[in-house]
Image: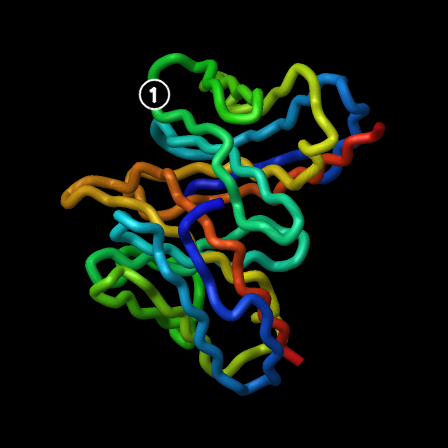
Amino acid sequence: AQSVTQPDIHITVSEGASLELRCNYSYGATPYLFWYVQSPGQGLQLLLKYFSGDTLVQGIKGFEAEFKRSQSSFNLRKPSVHWSDAAEYFCAVMGAAGNKLTFGGGTRVLVKP
Amino acid sequence: ETGVTQSPTHLIKTRGQQVTLRCSSQSGHNTVSWYQQALGQGPQFIFQYYREEENGRGNFPPRFSGLQFPNYSSELNVNALELDDSALYLCASSFKLAGAGDTGELFFGEGSRLTVL
């Protein structure tokens, strides 16, 4: 069975500082991996995805993520955060059946001025 | 902002009642998935509908049921509501090629927040 772990429940970062959110997955084959962001009162928005190829993936809003098969990780990074990046971030994996996403528990990001 | 709309946005029910949640998919999409997001947790897959048929189901009891209509909109029905059914219910639409898996690009609505008293 596939699973996703996001070890950090909350992260506080100063505006302008770098951000890294951790994600570890469990899946028997090459996974499809995703990062979504959820702002208060809004639905989930796709930031980026990894299917195959280059292990460093660029997304929207200046985010990037790196797939490391040896560590079963897909960490999300941003070099310089903005106050508008305060939100909850979810890592997710999709299996071969291609019909469901399994999400991690999420990481809530707070941005200090 | 996606083209996925959900209704109602908020509702309150009591235990034992039944509820119907509605979702209009984004234009051009033929697949609808439903997720339950309890407070402080990640979304959990309930089921997916493709071509008006259930195409995969998560670990939810049969009292959670759904429909997809010819225009690809969808309903989620929950019977015999329990307190633990209180959650944000998210609908997501996507496009699936016949005989292929989903692209994974799900477009989510803003959800229906259900409170069961």
Q: Residue at x 37, y 55 (%)?
A: B33
| Label 1 neighbour load within 10 Å: few <14, some 14-19, many 20+ | few
Q: Residue at x 77, y 35 (%)?
A: A110
Vertically, is B4 above or below B13? above
**Mark 1 belongs to chain:** A
Is A99 placed left or right of B61 in the picture?
A: left
Q: Residue at x 64, y 27 (%)?
A: A21
From the top left corner, tell me how far across and down residue A8 is, in percent: 70, 34
Is A67 placed left or right of A52 in the picture?
A: right
Q: Which quadrant would the C terminus of chain A be assigned to in this image?
A: top right
Q: Residue at x 34, y 20 (%)?
A: A52
Which corner quadrant of the image does residue A32 belong to? top left
Which corner quadrant of the image does residue A104 belong to? top right
From the top left corner, tell me how far across and down residue A22 is, in percent: 62, 27
Vertically, is B64 above or below A45? below
Is B72 placed left or right of A108 in the picture?
A: left
Is A62 placed left or right of A59 in the picture?
A: right
* Residue farthest to the right, as pictured: A113
Q: Secondary structure at mark 1?
A: loop
Which corner quadrant of the image does residue B98 belong to? top left
From the top left corner, tell me how far across and down residue B66 is, in percent: 34, 69
Vertically, is B88 above or below B19? above
* Residue farthest to the left, as pictured: B99
Provide the residue designation for mark 1. A52
The image shows a total of numbered marks equal to 1
From the top left corner, tell me how far across and down residue B4 is, in percent: 42, 54
Q: How is the image coloured?
A: rainbow
Q: Which quadrant would the N terminus of chain A be assigned to in this image?
A: top left
Check disc 1 and give the amino acid type: Ser
Vertically, is A31 above or below A66? below
Q: Looking at the image, which is closer to me, B50 or A52?
A: B50
